[in-house]
Image: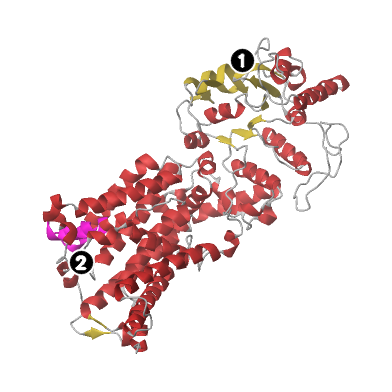
Amino acid sequence: MSNNFEPDATAAAPAVVTTAPGAPSAKKAAPVKSINLHQGEIVPGVAKVDPIIVADNVTRTFGGLKAVDVDHLEIPRNAITALIGPNGAGKTTLFNLLTGFDKPDSGTWTFAGQALAGIPAYKVAGMGQIRTFQLTKSLNLLSVLDNMKLGAKNQAGESFLKSLFPYFWRSEEKEIEAKAMEILARFKLDTKKTDYAASLSGGQRKLLEMARALMSDPTLVMLDEPMAGVNPALTQTLLDHILDLKTSGMTVLFVEHDMQMVRHIADWVIVMAEGKVVAEGPPDTVMQNPAVIDAYLGSHHDSDLGDPTEHVSAIKELLNDDDKS
Amino acid sequence: MIDWAQLFSNALTEIVNPTTAAYALAALGLAVHFGYTGLLNFGQAGFMALGAYGYAISTLTFGFPVWGAVLVGVGASIVFALILGIPTLRLRADYLAIVTIAAAEILRLIFTTNNFASVTGSANGLSGYKGGFAALNPLPEGSYGFGPFEANAYDTWLRIVAWTLVALACLFVWRIINSPWGRVLKGIREDEDAVRALGKNVFYYKMQSLVIGGVLGTLAGMIFILPRAVLPSNYQTTLTFFIYTILLLGGAATVLGPIIGSIIFWVLLSFVSGFISRAVAAGWLPFMDSVQAGQLRFIIVGLALMLIVIFRPQGIFGNKKELAFVK
């Protein structure tokens, strides 16, 4: 891990240069992992004790390519689940399907008991399943505070007729602003509230997007590569915020390529390859699954998984880490 | 010699001209579409045509009173916005641009076609619908105002109504934009997927925006025909581009920008064309005849639009800070 801090980073990350990859920082205790999330033997698609999402036979094809082909998948409630897999495994496509941003060819899934297939994205979000994007979508020419306020659900002032009469929304607006300031303070963005979101650094925009998602009091937060492009100085802050989400009772599902992060904070790991769930399990055991190593390194010489050396080193690091602990 | 006093007087009259008010109102509607919601509506001329024909036809053919004729025009533009919006607002912004420019042309051609000449007057257009509006005039006959702003009772009444409407429309737009509803619109302008992910029905908001801006354009179309006749050739795409010029001149995401933009546009246009035609008559421009002189002003308008977009893309009232992040 490098220590090239950004001068304007608002990160509260302690200035500790970690020596071993994935080692917890000096000031933070190792996160408490949720265990015993599954029922029975661990196989891909294993039943969970308390699932929040249950998906069946979800498929999505792009031309001749089956991007997602998931027979059965359950996401445990109030836990941090990581969705990993090589490039092109269908992780983001599955994300898009589950959040209503894309329509599947077939399949059903439920969120907290409610059938979600065919429900448009804005209604999915309204039910408490909020996502972020791989390429950060901060609303650039809105102030940081307006970005936050937009996140609040069921605002009376967002109805056209009521917007004409401030009487209907002025008090609500004050409450939303107070809540936004409280969350911004937690994310150390409160001093930037009047700045345009465009003026924030890439890492701060990731923070803002996550903070904005919290404005709606979600039950499930889905983060698509929360660490992509984030300065290492901000990484620890982001990790802490994700752990906080679990502490405050939310469920987290995230896509990530950073294996150290997965290992550090995930309670459960789901591995996808070529659209299918090939393995799942707690982070310390799933990496030893031969299917995972196949997925990353390629058991078939004819399948093109890009440059595998990065993944080789990532998996070696994880295996070494296992030996130590 | 050039009559400078007359030239300036004519230019100043444009400040209070109802046509200036009509363009301002149409540009304000476009500010709601383009400036605040990011909808590329290239068919504002179509909304104005609906206001003009809706008012004129319901007065002439059906004998509606003024309020009824206004309602018909507004209703027609709401239906038009729905027809345009339902298939295109789910798609990317460019599709709306293509569809609106085509739909506005379709409307104009329908109004021009000979088949409906008994109702629309075909290429000759319509006139003789001003009686109802004139009858509402509380001002007694006579001359009002002073200097370049002096006008008869009908024109003064029209000016009062037109600019009152503009003022009310500004208040209305200011109110809805500076509310949580307007915040959603601005969010959609920046990134509609992000707003969708926050649980807002983006399609519904875009539709509301299209209807509101379209109705403002329709009201503008009604003001536009009260000092003149309804002519289908007035509603060509050049009308839409003049309104875009006005909007960009004043500042796309501002409330007062379209109003000031319209005033500047018309004063300059009047001054430039008055000066050129007088200069040609005085023999100052021997290489140019009077017909060419009439066209030159539009070349100058085009040049002005290019200069604005290059050197001051945020417009006169736009926020310099916003510009710093425009990619």
Give SS at disc 2. loop
- State the scheme by which the image is colored: secondary structure
Q: Which residue is mark 1?
A: A45
**Circle 2 sits on which residue?**
B229
**Outermost residue, top side:** A41
For the stretch drawn in magenta, what is the main secondary structure?
Answer: helix
Looking at the picture, tell me which residue is in the foreground, B289 or B128: B289
Q: Which of the two marks, 1 or 2, is nearer to us in this view?
A: 2
Left or right: B156 in relation to B34: left
Q: Position of residue B156 (x, y in %)?
A: 26, 78
Residue shown at 21% from the left, 56% from the top: B54
Judge by depth and name the residue closer to the eye, B17 or B106.
B106
**What's the residue type where badge 2 is placed?**
Ala
Instruction: Please provide percent x and percent y for residue B321.
Output: 60, 62
Work out whether residue B240 can be spotted: yes
Q: CA distance from mark 1 to mark 2?
A: 73 Å
Which quadrant of the figure has residue A20?
top right
Residue A166 forms part of the magenta stretch: no
| Type of amino acid at the residue the image marks with label 1 | Gly
Q: Is residue A259 above or below residue B147?
A: above
Near mark 2 (Cα within 10 A), the count class, few <14, some 14-19 or many ≥20, is: some
Q: Quadrant of residue A78?
A: top right
Say which quarter of the image contains residue A151: top right
Q: Which mark is residue A75?
A: none
- Asked whether residue B52 is drawn in magenta, I would say yes
Q: Is residue B296 above or below residue A256?
A: below
The residue range painted magenta reads B50-70
Residue B108 locus on image (x, y percent): 25, 54
- Determine the chain carrying the residue at label 1: A
